[in-house]
């Protein structure tokens, strides 16, 4: 059985959004709640390119640079937010031995995933906790 956890850093990201972009925060919160109660949806969170053709509400992809370094990090975007110009990514880790997903960040689309970026550094620190 899969389980979803939201890291304190991601909670802080969401709190910031509730103040600065409540529509995006609400949609992201709903998606996370949806995931918690939907095993099929959780299973999809490790299917690279799931929803890329917009056949689903989300688009899942590997964080390829980190995957190559044996870090099981992923990102997803929510199409209906994209359509409204609200561009955020949910960055998460998957721990296959336990079937646990850990949401580590809610990042603005402009985030470039560069390893020297402070947000990347924060995500990697949180990932190393697992």
Image (cartoon, rainbow, N blue to C red):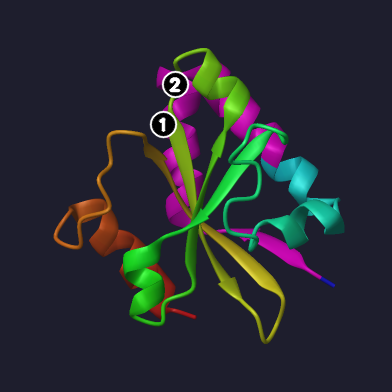
User: Which of the numbered marks, if any, corresponds to residue 72?
Assistant: none
Mark 2, residues whose alpha carbon is within 10 Å: few (<14), some, or many (≥20)?
A: few
Is 13 or 76 nearer to us in this picture?
Answer: 76
Q: Which residues are magenta?
A: 2-31
Q: Is residue 44 left or right of residue 63?
A: right
Distance of label 2 from label 1 (alpha carbons): 5 Å
Estimate the x, y position of residue 30 in percent, counting from the top left.
71, 33
Q: What x and y, as percent, mark residue 76?
A: 54, 46
Q: Nearer the viewer, residue 47 or 22?
A: 47
Q: Give the residue drawn at x 64%, y 38%.
A: 58
Q: Which mark is residue 19?
A: 2
Which residue in the rendered view is the most extreme toward the top? 84
Quadrant of the rendered structure where residue 124 is?
bottom left
Residue 93 position (above or below residue 120): below
Furthest residue to the left? 116
Q: Nearer the viewer, residue 115 or 22?
A: 115
Element marked by disc 2: helix
Examine the image and state in which quarter residue 70 appears. Answer: bottom left
Which residue is farthest bottom? 97
Numbered circle sitting on residue 16: 1
Q: Residue at x 45, y 28 (%)?
A: 17
Q: Position of residue 32 (x, y in %)?
A: 68, 44
Q: Is residue 7 magenta?
A: yes
Q: Residue at the location (40% across, 19% down)?
A: 20
Q: Does residue 8 show up magenta in the picture?
A: yes
Q: How many marks?
A: 2
> Relative to 66, is 86 on the left or the right?
right
Dominant secondary structure of the residues highlighted in magenta in the image: helix
Asked whether the residues under the numbered discs 2 and 1 touch, taking CB atoms below 8 Å apart as contact, a structural biologist would say yes
Helix, strand or loop at disc 1?
A: helix
Quadrant where the N terminus lies?
Answer: bottom right
């Amino acid at each position: 059985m899969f389980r979803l956890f939201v890291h304190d850093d991601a909670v802080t990201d969401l709190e910031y959004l509730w103040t600065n972009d409540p529509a995006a925060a609400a949609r992201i919160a709903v998606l996370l709640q949806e995931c918690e109660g939907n095993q099929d949806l959780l299973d999809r969170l490790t299917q690279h390119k799931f929803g890329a053709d917009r056949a689903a509400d989300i688009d899942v992809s590997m964080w390829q640079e980190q995957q190559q370094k044996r870090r099981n990090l992923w990102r997803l975007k929510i199409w209906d937010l994209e359509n409204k110009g609200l561009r955020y990514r949910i960055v998460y880790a998957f721990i296959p031995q336990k079937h646990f997903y850990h949401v580590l960040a809610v990042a603005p689309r402009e985030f470039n995933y560069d390893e020297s970026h402070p947000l990347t550094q924060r995500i990697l620190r949180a990932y190393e906790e697992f």
